[in-house]
Each structure stands twice: as C-alpha cells, then as structure tokens.
Amino acid sequence: MVLSYSHNLRISAALLLFGVAQPRALAAQQSDVGRDTVPAMDPHAVQPERPTVATHAGTVAAGWVEVETGLERDSYAATRVGWQNPTVIKLGVARNAQLNVAETVVRPPGTSAGFGDLTVGLKWRLSDAYPVLGRFAVLPSVKFATGSLRRGLGTGTTDMSMLLISSHALGGVEMDLNAGYTRRSGNGSAAPRDATVWTASFGGSLRGPVGWTAECFGYPGTGGPAGAAPIVALLAGPTFLARAWLAFDAGLIVPIAGPQPHALYAGTVYNVGQLWGPRGPRHSD
C-alpha cells in the first residue's frame, strides 16, 4: 500500500521536528523550568523534544547523549490503522549545539513494517534571552530517501529543512513556538517541492512528577501534483518524570481540519550519560 501524501508529509515533518521531530511523545517540562533564561544546570536531566512535532530551544550538554523513542497508532478509518515507532539520538557537540539523528519504523495500514527516511540535523541555540524571541534556536536538517516510496515508508525525496524555535517560561507554563520550511528534490509528483509547518506547544506540572502537555500544530496546504489540503490538529496528554534522567508520556491527537488521522501515542526519553568531557558533579534523581 502507498500512503497518502498527507501521511508522508507527517512522517517527514515529524522527523524534521523530532530530531528534527516526530509527532508525539514527551514533555516533562519540569526538567527544564525557566529554560528561556537559564539553561538546565544538571546535564543528566532529560530534555524531551516531543510530543507531536514541537521542539524546544534547549540543547543536550556537550559530551552527553540522550535517546527518545515512542509509539503512535494512527486511525485513518475503522479498518485502516497504521503504526509509527520514531527514535532520535541527541548528542551534545558544543555548549549550545546538539546533533540529532532520527529514524522511524513505519507500518502503513495493510502492509508490513519497515524503516522510513533517515534525518540528520543540528540544533544551534543562538540565545537564552532574546527580546520577544526568548530562548531561540535554529534547526537545519537533511532528510535522506532511505525509506521505500513504493511501500509508503518515505517520500522518495531528499529534503532540506529549516526550523525556527522560540521558547518561553510563562509563570509555571512552558511555551514553545516552532515554524519550519522544507524544500524537496524530485518533480513534485510524490511529494510537493515546498512545505511548511507550525506548532504552538504548552506544558507544565500538575502534581509532583506528573505534568501535562497540550499542543496545536498545522501543515499549511501545498500545491503541485501531490498537493494536499491544510492540516490542523490538537494534541494533549499527561507526562511523568520517573527520574531526572528518565521521563514518560502518553496522549491523543485529534484532527481539527484536513486529512490528519486520529492517533494515540506513548513514549519515553532517557539521558544515557556523558561520553566525553570533564567529569563534574551531577544529580541522578
């Protein structure tokens, strides 16, 4: 089965923002409180970059590695269900820069699972306290056509993307605003040459380690042979910070407009530890 363009768009845009992103999983925002003004002091504390396609402007500490993974169930109709298992590895390469490598196992409705397109990106935090923009970062990335277009596992294109990220602390609520643009190879028959995405994500603490996240995201309409109608959707769910270095979440995605499937998701993020650099004091709980 060949997935509709709208689904392929969600896979590629998700990779853009999840690692460049993936839609869903995790926002234990309490691990990065006040991140628009003061970076997290504990390098072993997780910095979740999901759920959905939203990400924050924070970066993993230099020399440290963090892994995020999750599972999403997409319902296109009563008998058409697909699954995605996105995973991203984040490596701190400088005080304000983070390398992202993202891959997704995709199982389209009615067919077997396989690996989707591979995305590599570099999140560069430009400031912790810009006027208006707050904590601000850019995330350029490249998506390679490693997933099978025939099986609906990828778009069959090489994509160049740029994501702008603005993060703010509003009292006890964290707000992350994203805006992205993608330029694709090919003739536009498999996926539009140009695509954009926007997100507005909010999260905070409910009680102790239990938190919440809510997000509105959209993919504006595209033109060309593979053009699609605009998509707007809402996501919401709880988060749980089991340890400073381990967080979980779950929730649902509900379409407002366009061909966005109803979805359920669950995920986890794990700060593996330090690979190189000077050993300093850290807090493990």
Image (spheres, rainbow, N blue to C red):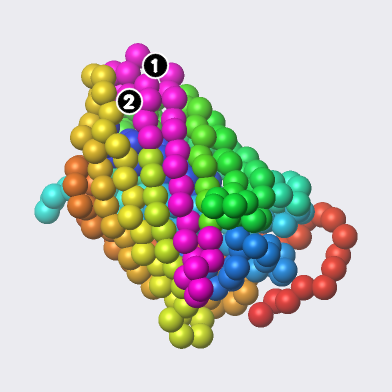
Taking the spot 32% from the left edge, 25% from the top edge, the residue there is 191
Specify the segment rendered in magenta: 168-196
Q: Which of 211 and 126 lies nearest the eye of the viewer?
A: 126
In the image, taking residue 220 as reference, residue 124 lies left or right, namely right
Q: Where is residue 86 shown, x and y percent of the image? A: 45, 50
Could you say which disc has been placed on residue 225 in the image?
A: none
Residue appearing at x 28%, y 28% in the figure: 222
Determine whether the residue tagged by mark 1 lies in a helix, strand or loop.
loop
Q: Residue furthest bottom?
A: 207
Is residue 179 a member of the stretch shown in magenta? Answer: yes
Residue at 76%, 60% (x, y): give it: 274
Magenta stretch, overall SS: strand
Badge 1, how many Cα within 10 Å: few under 14, some, many 20+?
some
**Residue 105 in the image: x percent, y percent?**
42, 45
Q: Is residue 105 above or below residue 276?
A: above
- Give how far across and how far down residue 265 sits, in percent: 35, 61
**Which numbered tag is attached to residue 186?**
1
Query: Nearer the N terminus, badge 1 or badge 2?
Result: 1
**Do the CB atoms of the residues marked 1 and 2 lie less than 8 Å apart?**
yes
User: Can residue 143 be seen by looking at this rendering?
Assistant: no
Q: Is residue 42 above or below residue 13?
A: below
Q: Pick the residue in front: 162 or 120.
A: 162
Is 254 placed above or below 170 here?
above
**Badge 1 amino acid:** Gly
Location of residue 230 in the rendering, given as x and y in whole percent from the top left corner: 24, 38
Q: Which residue is mark 2?
A: 191
What residue sits 32% from the left and 18% below the top? 188
